[in-house]
Image (cartoon, rainbow, N blue to C red):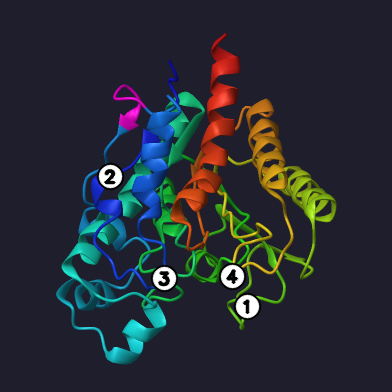
């Protein structure tokens, strides 16, 4: 039986327009798939609660939070958010950042923990963007640092899109190191400045991409000594992802997640994973891609306990 902590909530997936590009059903499908595989069980599935306002305000404008929760956002702001506002969206949005925060705390205790959501790295201090409303990565880093639970955090973002919101929110926080490995010709059009940005050429396939990931991770670990890594394992680098523009195979995804997790655990650095971006009409297939990082974390955990 796996003792890998898995954090999720039933509200992560809710009734959502079927023709919308964002795959809202994938979170529940991911949990169900992991249950079918025997990786998720009642013993290791953990449900977060709603985040307190003071937690969210570590990284976000109070007025922005009020406008979103009350449904007072302008039509232009909602278009930039990319998601139709609803009470169900508010509920999930107030829980998910706490899921990453909880995952990070569990990782500090156990060495490795996975959030079956998260990675909303386009959310900025006072506006939503690119399907991202609240920045769970920045919230978690800010809270852990403020509470003195860590002295340094590395956000290692391998989503195909740059983590622009994370970079801007944490720009003046020297204890948080933001690293984004992303396709150079992709959203957002105007890039922010992370502590380290690595542009992957459009159309890059496994060998080139994996070499970039390994070289970048080695470089970062030579520069900083984090007490915790938050790993955004976006699967939109996959060759068939409609928003990706890279040519990474399924096996390439698995090798990437394995090398990141094994490198960090070999260095005895706690790791909290989030699933990041991934888009597909076939949401069951998408859920299986998101499961790869959890499967690799599970394998590492089982090997360590045997």
Q: Quadrant of the C terminus?
A: top right
Task: State the separation of the CA atoms marked 3 and 1.
Answer: 17 Å
Left or right of residue 90, residue 7 in this image: right
- Say which mark, if any, is on residue 131: 3
**Residue 200 visible in the snapshot:** yes
Alpha-carbon neighbours of circle 1 within 10 Å: few (<14), some, or many (≥20)?
A: some
Residue located beneath label 1 in the image: 191
Alpha-carbon neighbours of circle 3 within 10 Å: few (<14), some, or many (≥20)?
A: many
Residue located beneath label 2 in the image: 9
- What residue is at 34 percent from the left and 54 percent from the top? 97
Task: State the separation of the CA atoms marked 1 and 2.
Answer: 32 Å
Q: Decide whether residue 31 is among the magenta residues.
A: no
Indicate the position of residue 164 as horizontal and vertical percent values.
55, 71
Left or right of residue 97, residue 243 in this image: right
Indicate the position of residue 284 as horizontal and vertical percent values.
45, 49
Quadrant location of residue 19? bottom left
Q: Secondary structure at mark 1?
A: loop
Task: State the separation of the CA atoms marked 2 and 4.
Answer: 26 Å
Name which of mark 2 and mark 4 comes first in the sequence: 2
Compared with residue 202, is residue 176 higher up or lower down, i.e. above or below? above
Task: State the separation of the CA atoms marked 1 and 4.
Answer: 17 Å
The mark closer to the camera, 3 or 4, is: 4
Task: State the separation of the CA atoms marked 3 and 2.
Answer: 19 Å
Name which of mark 3 and mark 1 comes first in the sequence: 3
Alpha-carbon neighbours of circle 2 within 10 Å: few (<14), some, or many (≥20)?
A: many
Indicate the position of residue 118 as horizontal and vertical percent values.
42, 53
In the rendered structure, which segment of residues is drawn in magenta?
Answer: 41-45
Residue located beneath label 4 in the image: 243
């Amino acid at each position: 039986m796996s003792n890998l902590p898995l954090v999720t909530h039933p509200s992560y997936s809710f009734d959502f327009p079927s023709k919308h590009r964002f795959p809202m059903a994938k979170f529940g499908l991911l949990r169900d798939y992991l249950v079918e595989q025997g990786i998720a069980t009642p013993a290791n599935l953990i449900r977060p609660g709603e985040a307190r306002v003071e937690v969210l305000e570590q990284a976000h404008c109070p007025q922005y939070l009020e406008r979103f929760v009350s449904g007072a956002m302008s039509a232009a702001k909602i278009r930039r958010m990319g998601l139709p506002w609803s009470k169900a969206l508010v509920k999930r949005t107030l829980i998910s950042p706490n899921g990453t925060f909880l995952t990070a705390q569990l990782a500090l205790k156990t060495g490795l923990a996975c959030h079956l959501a998260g990675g909303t790295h386009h959310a900025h201090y006072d506006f939503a963007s690119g399907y991202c409303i609240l920045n769970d990565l920045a919230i978690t880093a800010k809270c852990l640092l403020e509470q003195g639970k860590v002295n340094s955090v590395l956000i290692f973002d391998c989503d195909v899109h740059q983590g622009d919101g994370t970079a801007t929110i944490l720009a003046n926080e020297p204890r948080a190191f933001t690293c984004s490995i992303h396709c150079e010709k992709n959203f957002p059009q105007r890039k922010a400045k992370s502590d380290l940005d690595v542009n992957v050429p459009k159309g890059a396939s496994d060998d080139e991409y994996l070499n970039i990931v390994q070289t970048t991770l080695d470089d970062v670990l030579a520069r900083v000594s984090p007490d915790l890594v938050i790993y955004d394992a976006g699967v939109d680098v996959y060759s068939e992802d409609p928003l990706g523009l890279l040519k990474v195979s399924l096996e390439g995804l698995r090798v990437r997640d394995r090398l990141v997790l094994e490198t960090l655990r070999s260095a005895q650095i706690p790791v909290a994973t989030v699933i990041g971006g991934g888009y597909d009409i076939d949401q069951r297939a998408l859920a299986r891609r998101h499961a790869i990082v959890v499967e690799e974390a599970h394998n590492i955990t089982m090997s360590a306990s045997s």
